[in-house]
Each structure stands twice: as structure tokens, then as C-alpha cells.
Image (cartoon, helix red, strand yellow):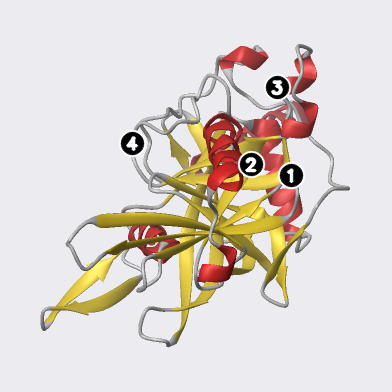
Amino acid sequence: MKKKLSVFISLLMVIALVFSLSACAEVENGSKIQRMKMVLTYTDANGEETERTVQIKLYQNFAPKTVAHFVKLAESGYYDGTVVSNIQSGWLEFGGYKSENDKLVAYGNDVETVDGEFSLNGWLGNSLKTSNVGALVMKRNYSLESDTKSAYNTAKGTVIVTLASGSKFKSTEYCYFGLICSDDECYTVTEDSATAKKTSLDAVKALADYKENADGITVYYYETTGEYYSMKKYTDDSGTSVTEYYKGATASSENLLEGDELDDFNDIRNDSQKNCFLLTVPYTKITVKSIKKA
């Protein structure tokens, strides 16, 4: 009898331990949370070297395979040294390129893909939506685009971060697997002689300022051919707004696009509206120093 009682008490203790461990896990909106820290380095608008630590929440129950894939890559150091390679008004992306001699170099072609957790891929348990600002989205692998199911694989490692609500990347077609934290206070800035506290999401959204430099020049990288283009916006002597396009990363009269060359580039721009092959390169290099578990 004493032996049975001892076994019973031991069993109760094991059950209590399991429940206590479960209770310790962070849960949000019905999903276990894995927290990560991403460290970014770049030169700010004042020419100073800046480092920002960005807090990330991953939703393990919403996108288990994609979260595990991202964590495995991050912990292995895959993202270390990759750069923000594309900045748009409503999103940016990192993880697909490194920078060598101020040029983008494609990275990660040997990384496997995983099936993303979203409705068009047969997964109905992901509650993250297009309306979520600061969402982490695994970019689709366009090399697999076809009428087959392979079109719904997530990318090898390139991650999109939404900077505004209503992202063009529909949550029914892309895997949303995490959020940049918007409730922490990770740094302070001085604005109009007042100190303002900023969050991780503020830090990432501020990167959109590096889309166009002080001279009104935006630089593009065309993934298909590896060529650079640039756009310059200015106001001429008559007060008219002018937009010009150039072949190359610098805007000079020698490489101004006109006639058929300009028509060809506009075709590239129109095609990129759908497939995102034309990257808007930030005018300062923004590097992912590391991504680790918090």
C-alpha cells in the first residue's frame, strides 16, 4: 500500500512539474512565443555608426515549420552579415544578400525550402494577418513559381518585414510567422530638445528613411541581370518636378536613360510590381550583425 501511495505521489509530482513548465512558457493569442534578438548596424543620417537591438516574437503554433526553419538558420549564424537589400514604403527585406565592395552578392542558394503555413498551402491555423504592422514574412521562392504546389514553398531564408498595415504580401499566400515588438523601449532619441522613447518597431520603421538620399537619388538592383539603375528626383529652374532614370548606381548625364532604353527599364519596373525583382537598395549599408534567442 505504501509503495502504491509512493508511486501515486511521484506521478502527481511529475504531472505538476509538466504543468509548471507549460505555465512558464510565454503564450500569446493561443500560441507559444519564441523571443529573438536581432542586432542591426548602420551609419545613420548624421554619419555616425549606429547599433540597434531589435526584439522579435515568433509564433510557434501559428507557423511551426517556418519558425523552426528561421530559428535554425539564425542560430547557425546564417543571417550574420546579411544586409537589408530592399526598402519600400511599406516593407523591407533582409537575408538574401551580403555586401561585398559595396555591391550586393546573392546568398543562401543552398538553403532548403519549407512549405509555408498559410491558407493557400492548406494551413488554417495562422492568425497573423496582412494588417499586422512589423510582421515577419518568409518571402516566396520565385524560382519555384509554377502551377504546381512547389509555388507555395516559403523562401530559403529571405525575410520581409511589413512597415505599414495592408501589406501587398497577402497572409493567405505568404507565411507570416512573427512580429517586431512594439511594446518595448529599446532606445531613446532627442527630438526638438525633448527625449523620446522608441521601440523595436520604431527602429525598424525608421530604416525606410534610407530609401532616398539627400540628393533625391534612389538606387535599384535588378535581380534578374545583376545590374544597377538609379532614379533622381529634383525641381528644375522653372519649378517643375523632374524624375530621371539612369543605368548604373550613379546619376550622371553619361548614363541617362532615354528612348528605347527608358522604355525597357519601365517594362522592368512594371514587371517588378508583381514579382519584386527590382530591389530598392538603401543608400547606407544596413547589416544584420546577429539574430539569437533572447
Q: Which residue is mark 1?
A: 224
Binning the other alpha carbons within 10 Å of mark 4 as few (below 14), some (14 to 19) or many (20 upward) gives some
Which amino acid type is marked by label 3? Tyr
Which amino acid type is marked by label 2? Phe
Q: Earlier in the sequence, mark 1 or mark 2?
A: 1
Let me know if residue 33 appears in the view. Answer: no
Q: SS class of the residue under badge 4?
A: loop
Which amino acid type is marked by label 1? Thr
Closer to viewer: mark 1 or mark 4: 1
Pinpoint residue 5: horizontal percent, then vertical percent: 69, 29
Which amino acid type is marked by label 4? Ser
Image mark for residue 152: 3
Residue at 79% across / 21% down in the picture? 150
Front-lying residue, 153 or 69 = 153
Front-lying residue, 265 or 119 = 265
The image shows residue 110, relative to residue 276, as above or below, that is below
Q: Earlier in the sequence, mark 1 or mark 3?
A: 3
Residue at 50% across / 30% down in the picture? 169
Image mark for residue 154: none
Let me know if residue 158 appears in the view. Answer: yes
Q: SS class of the residue under badge 2?
A: loop
Q: Earlier in the sequence, mark 4 or mark 3?
A: 3
Q: Earlier in the sequence, mark 1 or mark 4?
A: 4
Q: Earlier in the sequence, mark 2 or mark 3?
A: 3
Image mark for residue 165: 4
Q: Which residue is mark 2?
A: 277
Q: Earlier in the sequence, mark 2 or mark 4?
A: 4
* Separation of marks 1 and 4 at Cα, in angstroms: 29 Å
The image shows residue 71, relative to residue 175, as above or below, that is below
